[in-house]
Amino acid sequence: MGQRQVSSTRAIAATPEKIFELLADPAKHPLFDGSGTVLASRSGGPERLSLGAKFGMDMKMGRSYKILNTVVEFEEGRRIAWRHFNGHRWRWELTPLDDGSTQVTETFDWSTARLPLLISLSPFPKRNKEAIEKSLARLDRLFPG
């Protein structure tokens, strides 16, 4: 894990634009979250994400907590990533395929974290890789071919 990121890719039977609309709506994040930690978006945030947008989420990992995220990468219909106070990123990249579907890659990138070595030594990379695969499967079910 020297590269300090884990990711997975899956073809989804929808256009990048349709998938991006779901990703850019924080209220919809619990629908595709495979980690089981994302409960709901917090009130007062944007309805649609954009570069620099801040949005809060109600989370639960053992116990409930709140997190504030900032969108740090944004290319309409193709790429979106957000981070919170520790600096690691959750990135979604969408590539249109010839058959009208989309190659979707989700990445947990801790190369930008404040303490990347601690994350590397923790169970989070393995756990997040499994959650990414579950998120992509949930996304696939949201867009049946």
Image (spheres, grey):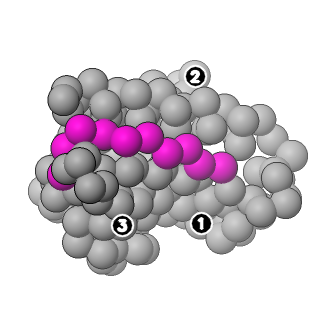
Looking at the picture, which amino acid does disc 3 mark?
Answer: Arg
**Residue located 27% across and 25% down the image:** 141
Q: Nearer the viewer, residue 126 or 121?
A: 126
Query: How packed is label 2: few (under 14 Cα within 10 Å), some, or many (20 or more)?
Result: few
**Residue located 41% across and 35% down the image:** 136
Q: Could you say where residue 8 lies in the image, as x and y percent from the top left? A: 55, 44
Q: Which mark is residue 87?
A: 1
The overriding secondary structure of the stretch rendered in magenta is strand
Local SS, label 1: loop
In the rendered image, residue 69 lying in the magenta stretch gets the answer no
Exactly how many numbered labels are in the figure? 3
In the rendered image, residue 11 lying in the magenta stretch gets the answer yes
Q: Could you say where residue 92 lies in the image, as x and y percent from the top left? A: 41, 56
Q: Which mark is residue 79?
A: 3
**Residue located 54% across and 53% down the image:** 107
Chain-order first, disc 2 or disc 3:
2
